[in-house]
Image (tube, rainbow, N blue to C red):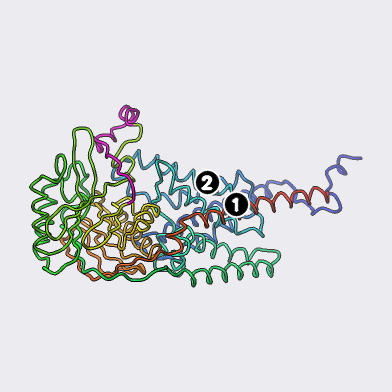
């Protein structure tokens, strides 16, 4: 056999293009086109995030990402995932640069790496487009738990509150919302590129029908248990001041000033996180006496965020005073903010960074579900950062919370990115759990959210606000409140395993034919 014969393609195979400079250049350009598509997909996903409300950009981003991933080997999927992750996380985490530029870089690298790793779960075959939304759901599930107990900012579901997919929240929580949102976009790409379009169309129609039926049947058990006339206070003041530099007494006085206008026929008054700063337990302080007087004057249960400082640590609590002025219950924040309320491996970081100057003492972690037993009823509580974690809100509701309180403090941030994201998280918890959510922040955003996720009242940033509304008390549990993320995680795991099995079977069949 001559050299020419040895290089000739087999008769049964597709004729190969010669490896000329032009052919190499064409493949190089095609690779760059995919990278650009991956970057654009990440930017589209970022464009759907709060404070924007362009929910439709997320399905478009998922469709573009799916098309870019099809046919790629694992190394190329890893690179493409990193590019898409950069397009998503660089703009949505940019607020971190105001705190610690090196910290922003570290978080960005970690989040981009997680996004890239998730793309390794994707099956590049045209018929298995559904592994893309499954991988994105897996990514969100990991980010809600890793590192340091999770860092779910931003969350893909939080851009969907004004879109149709949020209707699935009572059934499967934010992970199901992510699955349906990205699945819709991936399905469009699947229909366009699939060889067997009829089979793909049947699969898409079946998934849509099952999802619609599940959403329609996702009704909470139980029913209304009355209503509360509530007031939520925001003292206002300057923004962009780190917590260690804030004047605690000024914050307290602004809130008392705003509360002078409270009517005398309220059921519940909510003040923000860190409304009151004291040394040692709050019970015997002058501030506690003033809060008791406020409760007696309004005839309401008053809940305020209290910071109790010690020599080497502090406690972040929500404390409730009854209408007669008695201190009746308290909840201490269980899910602390890493590098915000405590420093993991503090001894190591004290040698590597000046970040510890922003967090001179660690918060003492609380225990148990966030529940306050009060004359206004059992009140669920998630303090600030905890609103981003559905397990904390679920624990409060399953313990008996008939309304959900979110005392928070976003005064350290100069932009509206984080305050708007917190409101979105409060709205998502409301939809997941069928509970009204009251969120109070010293400088905003303060908001009253109804059980359907709609906003009844919302204040501005930096201004004094006093929001009032009548909200329902609820006792029933949604399917998601009962089951949590487990059904969605099992479904996603099964989908990814099925994708892997199809891939292995396809390889074996090709080997048998060869």
Q: Nearer the viewer, residue 74 or 135?
A: 135
The quadrant of the rendering that contains the N terminus is top right
Who's the residue at 32% across and 40% down the image?
339
Who's the residue at 45% across and 48% down the image?
143
Q: On residue 116, which mark appears?
A: 2
Q: Earlier in the sequence, mark 1 or mark 2?
A: 2
Q: Which residues are magenta?
A: 346-369
481 sits left or right of 302 in the view: right
Q: Secondary structure at mark 1?
A: loop
Residue 363 sits above or below residue 118 on the image: above
Queried whether the magenta region covers residue 362, the answer comes back as yes
67 sits left or right of 337 in the view: right
Residue 355 sits above or below residue 126 on the image: above
**Pointer 1: what residue?**
122
374 sits left or right of 387 in the view: left
x, y percentage for residue 215? 49, 69
């Amino acid at each position: 056999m001559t050299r020419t014969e040895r290089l000739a393609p087999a008769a049964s195979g597709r004729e190969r293009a010669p490896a000329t400079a032009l052919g190499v250049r064409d493949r190089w350009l095609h690779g760059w086109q995919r990278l650009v598509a991956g970057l654009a997909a990440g930017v589209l996903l970022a464009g759907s995030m709060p404070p924007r409300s362009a929910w439709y950009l997320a399905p478009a981003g998922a469709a573009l990402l799916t098309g870019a991933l099809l046919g790629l080997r694992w190394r190329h999927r890893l690179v493409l995932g990193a590019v898409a992750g950069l397009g998503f996380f660089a703009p949505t985490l940019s607020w971190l640069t105001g705190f610690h530029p090196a910290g922003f870089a570290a978080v960005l690298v970690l989040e981009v790496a997680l996004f890239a790793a998730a793309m390794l779960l994707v099956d590049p075959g045209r018929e298995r487009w559904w592994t893309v939304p499954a991988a994105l759901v897996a990514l969100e599930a990991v980010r809600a738990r890793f590192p340091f107990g999770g860092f779910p900012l931003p969350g893909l579901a939080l851009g969907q509150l004004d879109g149709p997919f949020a209707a699935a929240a009572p059934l499967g929580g934010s992970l199901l919302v992510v699955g349906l949102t990205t699945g819709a976009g991936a399905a469009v790409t699947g229909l366009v590129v699939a060889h067997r379009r009829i089979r793909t169309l049947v699969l898409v129609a079946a998934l849509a029908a099952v999802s619609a039926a599940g959403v329609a049947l996702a009704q909470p058990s139980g029913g209304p248990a009355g209503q509360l006339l509530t007031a939520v206070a925001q003292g206002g003041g300057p923004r962009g001041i780190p917590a260690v530099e804030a004047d605690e007494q000024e914050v307290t006085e602004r809130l008392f000033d705003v509360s002078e206008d409270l009517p005398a026929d309220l059921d519940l008054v909510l003040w923000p996180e860190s409304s009151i700063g004291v040394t040692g337990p709050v019970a015997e302080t002058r501030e506690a006496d003033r809060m008791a007087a406020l409760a007696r004057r309004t005839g309401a249960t008053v809940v305020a965020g209290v910071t109790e400082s010690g020599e080497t640590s502090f406690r972040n609590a929500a404390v409730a005073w009854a209408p007669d002025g008695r201190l009746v219950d308290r909840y201490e924040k269980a899910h602390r903010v890493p590098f915000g309320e405590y420093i993991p491996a503090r001894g190591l970081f004290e040698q590597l960074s000046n970040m510890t100057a922003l967090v001179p003492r660690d918060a003492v972690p609380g225990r148990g579900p966030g529940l306050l037993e009060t004359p206004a009823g059992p009140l669920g509580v998630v303090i600030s950062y905890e609103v981003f974690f559905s397990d904390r809100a679920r624990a409060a509701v399953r313990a008996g919370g008939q309304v959900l309180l979110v005392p928070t403090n976003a005064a350290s941030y100069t932009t509206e990115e984080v305050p708007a994201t917190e409101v979105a998280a409060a709205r998502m918890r409301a939809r997941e759990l069928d509970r009204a959510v009251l969120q109070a922040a010293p400088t905003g955003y303060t908001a009253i959210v109804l059980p359907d996720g709609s906003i009844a009242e919302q204040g501005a940033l930096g201004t004094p606000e006093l929001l009032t509304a009548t909200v329902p008390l609820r006792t029933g549990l949604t399917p998601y409140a009962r089951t949590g993320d487990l059904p969605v995680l099992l479904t996603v795991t099964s989908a990814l395993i099925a994708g892997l099995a199809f891939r292995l079977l396809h390889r074996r069949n090709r080997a048998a034919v060869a």
